[in-house]
Amino acid sequence: RISDSVIDGNAAAGLFSEVFARDVTVAQATCVGCGRTASVGTLHMYAQEMGAVLRCPGCQGVVMRMARTTTHMWIDATGSRSIVIPLGPDA
C-alpha cells in the first residue's frame, strides 16, 4: 500500500542537505519554454539587491527566481522542467 510508505516531509532533511550543499551552478536545468538543457551557470542572471532572475540564453524565458529577505530564501524553479545536480566527487 502506498499510504504505508508516506512519512513526514521532515524526513527528507538529510536528502535536501546533500543536494543543496553542492555547487548548483554545475546543475543541468531544462527550460520549460524552449527545452534547452544547460548548466545553471550559463543562464543569464538579472540581479537586484533582494534577489535574482535567471533566464534561458536560448529563448529568454525565466528559468528560476530567487529572493532573499532577512528571514527567508525563496526559490521558484517553475520555469524549469527539471534541475539535475551531479553528486559525484568532482561536483
Image (spheres, rainbow, N blue to C red):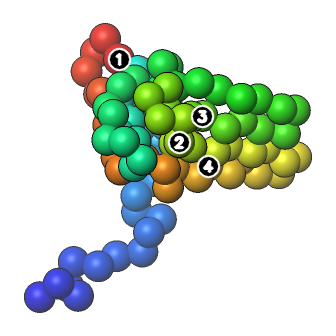
The CA span between labels 3 and 2 is: 9 Å
| Disc 4 + disc 3, Cβ < 8 Å | no
Q: Amino acid at mark 2?
A: Gly
**Marks 4/1: CA distance?**
21 Å
Disc 1 crowd rating (10 Å Cα; few below 14, some 14-19, many 20+) is few
The residue that appears at 36% across and 25% down in the rendered structure is 38
Q: Nearer the viewer, residue 85 or 38?
A: 38
Q: Which residue is mark 2?
A: 61
Mark yes or no: residue 32 visible: yes
Q: Quadrant of the N terminus?
A: bottom left
Q: Which comes before the other along the chain, label 3 or label 1?
A: 3
Mark 1 or mark 2: which is in front? Answer: 2
Left or right of residue 60, residue 58 in this image: left
For disc 4, the marked residue is 75
Badge 3 local density, few (<14 within 10 Å), some, or many (20+)? many
**Labelled disc at residue 91:** 1
Mark 4 or 1 closer to N-term?
4
**Mark in front: 3 vs 1:** 3
Which of pointers 3 and 2 lies earlier in the amino acid sequence?
3
From where the camera sits, is residue 83 visible?
A: no
User: Which residue corresponds to the image point at 34% horizontal and 76% vertical from the top-left?
Assistant: 7
